[in-house]
């Protein structure tokens, strides 16, 4: 009897949520723990891992975990390796690229990562044109516009399915604010808007219930949220940037997209997306909370009421964002 119940349930999971997920850059610092977390996600039935090297080993390792998915690794040595890693998947997560070393900004990564992301986006357009694309590779403010331009040039751009992953800023905010106000971080929610680097990261503390944080502590908290990545880069001392917390953030965001696909209601996460909010000011992409549904983004939410101080931060953010976005668009439009 029990076995009948169990097998019925297993059947229904694989029928209701048969999601195929590709991770590009899967053997890297983020890629490996992210692949592990996606292997544990019961909505995923087919997990494909691609990397220049090491993807087969990671896939073989994860394939021994008894969850409801197959895992396969692909490298450029395989015939059509990248294409087969992507063929008809519903969700593509891209953490491929180089991370920061001490003293570097995310923008310093552009010269290497822009080309990597452009080429991977081109393969996504050919092999998985309907997939939701989650970009982790930095600088996100520029790599997301690169992906959009590539997909546009191939006639498959769907603005509802392109996401810059900013969830790490969101989880850092929960953690850091809880340290200041002495609460449980799992109950803390801070809306973070703007972009994903330094001053473009804007935590809207005025929208939290913590209005009595002294001014100097508030300034320090905002700075820590904006530049929290530097703490990790410095502590790793040349061995990279955030990987474990980023894997958790990436997996949480990917799961939210899959929850939306599966028809769950009211799934809302901030993300850096093709946004109507400041288009009239020439800003094509902006991070704000979005509702995720069966077809990707259902609604881009406005940022809501902000304080005078946040308004000022927004102005500075927009100036930088505009340049970062244009840099990505120019790169993608230039001849190879
Ligand atoms: P890593 O160097 O440990 O791993 C990157 C992986 O990408 C390597 O395994 C490498 O072989 C692979 N790769 C490089 N070119 C590739 C290509 N053309 N195709 C497939 N795979 C390729 O770096 P890590 O720490 O995993 O970081 C990856 C990226 O994520 C960096 O750009 C980093 O700045 C970014 N990042 C983004 C965050 C965010 O909040 N969005 C947070 C932390 C890092």
Image (cartoon, rainbow, N blue to C red):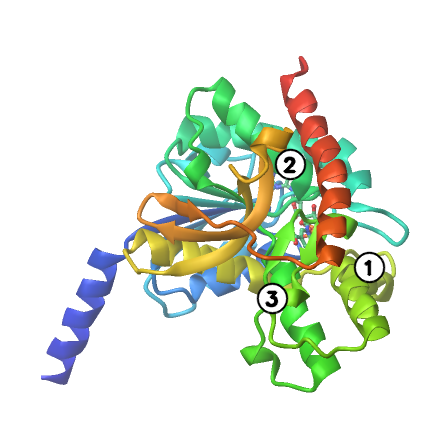
Q: Answer with left or right where residue 215 lies relative to residue 82.
A: right
Q: Disc 2 beta carbon < 8 A from ligand 1? A: no
Q: Residue furthest front?
A: 308
Q: Answer with left or right where residue 148 lies relative to residue 142.
A: left
Sequence-wise, the earlier of marks 1 and 3 is: 3
Question: Residue 59: in sight, yes or no?
Answer: yes
Sequence-wise, the earlier of marks 1 and 2 is: 2
> Which residue carries the number 2 mark?
143
Toward the viewer: 273 or 20?
Answer: 273
> Which residue carries the number 1 mark?
230
Instruction: Name the quarter where the C terminus is drawn.
Output: top right
Residue at x 56%, y 24% (from the top left corner): 149
Q: Residue furthest top?
A: 335
Residue at x 56%, y 34% (from the top left corner): 76
Residue count near mark 2 (Cα–Cα under 10 Å), binned few <14, some 14–19, many ≥20 = many
Image coords of residue 207 (percent x, y): 60, 66
Assign a secondary structure to mark 3. Answer: helix
> Which residue carries the number 3 mark?
207
Image coords of residue 50 (percent x, y): 53, 44
Assign a secondary structure to mark 2. Answer: helix
Image coords of residue 8 (percent x, y): 14, 70
Instruction: Name the quarter where the N terminus is drawn.
Output: bottom left
Toward the viewer: 100 or 177?
Answer: 177
Assign a secondary structure to mark 1. Answer: helix
């Amino acid at each position: 009897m029990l076995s009948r119940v169990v097998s019925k349930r297993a059947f229904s999971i694989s029928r209701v949520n048969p999601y195929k997920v590709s991770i590009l850059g899967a053997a890297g610092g983020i890629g490996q723990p992210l692949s592990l977390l996606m292997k544990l996600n019961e909505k995923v039935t087919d997990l494909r891992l691609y990397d220049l090297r090491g993807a087969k080993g990671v896939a073989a390792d994860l394939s021994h975990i008894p969850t409801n998915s197959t895992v396969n690794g692909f490298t450029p040595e395989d015939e059509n390796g990248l294409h087969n890693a992507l063929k008809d998947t519903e969700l593509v997560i891209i953490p491929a690229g180089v991370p920061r070393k001490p003293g570097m900004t995310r923008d310093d990564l552009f010269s290497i990562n822009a080309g990597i992301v452009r080429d991977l986006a081109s393969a996504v357009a050919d092999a998985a044109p309907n997939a939701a694309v989650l970009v982790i590779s930095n600088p996100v403010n520029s790599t997301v516009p690169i992906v959009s331009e590539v997909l546009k040039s191939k006639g498959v751009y769907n603005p509802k399915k392109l996401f810059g992953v900013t969830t790490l800023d969101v989880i850092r905010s929960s953690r850091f604010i809880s340290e200041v106000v002495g609460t449980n971080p799992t109950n803390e929610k801070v809306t973070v808007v703007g972009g994903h680097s330094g001053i473009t990261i804007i935590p809207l503390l005025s929208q939290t219930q913590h209005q009595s944080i002294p001014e100097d502590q508030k300034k320090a908290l905002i700075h820590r949220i904006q530049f929290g990545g530097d703490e990790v880069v410095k502590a790793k001392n040349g061995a990279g940037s955030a990987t474990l917390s980023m894997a958790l953030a990436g997996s949480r965001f990917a799961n939210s997209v899959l929850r939306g696909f599966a028809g769950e209601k009211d799934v809302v996460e901030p993300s850096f997306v093709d946004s109507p909010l400041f288009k009239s000011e020439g800003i094509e992409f902006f991070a704000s909370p979005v509702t995720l549904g069966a077809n990707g983004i259902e609604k881009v939410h406005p940022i809501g009421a902000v304080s005078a101080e946040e308004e000022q931060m927004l102005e500075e953010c927009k100036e930088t964002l505009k340049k970062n976005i244009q840099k990505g668009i120019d790169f993608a439009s230039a001849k190879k």
